[in-house]
Image (cartoon, grey):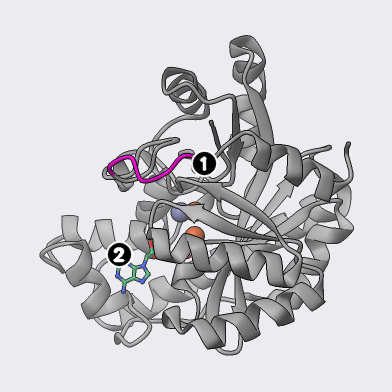
Amino acid sequence: MIDLHSHTDESDGTSTPAELIAEAKRVGLSALAITDHDTMRGYELAVPFAKEAKLELICGIELSTRLGGSSVHLLGYFPCQAPQGDFRDWLRFLLESRRDRNRRLIDRLRSLGVDITLEEVEKRGRSLTGRPHFARVLVEKGYASDIQHAFDEFLDESAKGYVQRHEVPIEEAIQRLVDAGGVASLAHPVRVAKNDWTKLTQYVGRMAEMGMKAIEVYHSDHSPENVAFYLSLAEKCGLTPTGGSDFHGGNKPNIQLGTGQRGNLRVPDSILSALKKTAGCC
Ligand code: AMP
Ligand code: ZN
Ligand code: FE
Ligand code: FE
């Protein structure tokens, strides 16, 4: 059993890289991909722990991209070799544009009379500070009753405090992954096109033309019907099926590493062999 979708506390998970490796061994995984949002630091920190534990560790990433006016998550896998040079510079640029959005978000909230500083939110989110960290501060300071209220009132796209963040066009993200020697996989397709299967089929066809080579067929949020449909879509478009739990530790406590929600997931080792073939490393 493997898990190709997981987050550490270097992005929005709660487990340290060392804790995540220990958990992977505990649940009996033979391979794990760390796919933090916009950063490979969690993977890098996990490498020595994985070696020690004799666990196969795959370098991955999750990127938020734009497709036809909506946000689509893309997974990138580097099973042969972690990316170097240009790709790393590009990730630094993404982090800097997130920081720029955060500064503008602080200005906006302050103009609405909210007493909040960048230092306060960055203390919680560190290099990957995002809206969930803003939400926590708003709750702690009494501006919202809970996280959801903070989003509804201030941070959601439709709320008064919202400011836009630069999101990469999906063509560019796919091209960057391909240029860096990676395989691009459409993350949790259940969240794409509001689950309109006709629209999803068109989107996936376009992404395949752009160079995307895989699709996340197996995921904690996928029903057996979803899995069957995405498998047929993978076959139709010549894409390699991937799968993983999307483990976030205590931030999504109903999701278990490897086995998903109430045991609805089990990704076989053969998925990794196929992914390696697609990446060209065997
Ligand atoms: P960011 O990347 O900083 O813009 O934050 C995006 C994250 O905020 C998402 O991954 C969700 O976890 C969270 N989020 C976005 N919109 C909402 C919402 N309306 N309600 C609750 N959480 C949200
Ligand atoms: Zn996440
Ligand atoms: Fe995602
Ligand atoms: Fe994820």
Give the prevailing secondary structure in the magenta stretch. loop
Seen in the picture, residue 79 relative to 191 is either above or below; the reply is: above
Q: Within 10 angstroms of label 1, few (less than 14), some, or many (20 or more) residues?
A: many
Quadrant (top left, top right, bottom left, bottom right) of the C terminus:
top right
Which residue appears at 63% of the width and 10% of the height? 52
Question: How many badges with numbers are in the image?
Answer: 2
**Badge 2 element:** loop
Residue 90 placement, left or right of 186: right
Q: Where is residue 61 in the image (x, y as percent from the top left)?
A: 64, 50
Seen in the picture, residue 158 relative to 265 is either above or below; the reply is: below
> Quadrant for ligand 1?
bottom left
**Badge 1 element:** loop
Q: Within 10 angstroms of label 2, few (less than 14), some, or many (20 or more) residues?
A: some
Q: What residue type is labelled 2?
A: Ile
Residue in front for this viewpoint, 23 or 226: 226
Which residue appears at 27% of the width and 42% of the height? 262
Seen in the picture, residue 49 relative to 63 is either above or below; the reply is: above
Q: Is residue 205 magenta?
A: no
Q: Quadrant of residue 2?
A: top right
Q: Which amino acid does label 1 sit on?
A: Glu
Residue 69 placement, left or right of 204: left
Q: Name the residue under label 1.
A: 10
Chain part drawn in magenta: 262-266
Q: Position of residue 185 (x, y in %)?
A: 67, 60
Q: Where is residue 175 in the image (x, y as percent from the top left)?
A: 82, 68
Residue 190 in sight: yes
Q: Mark 2 points at which residue?
A: 116
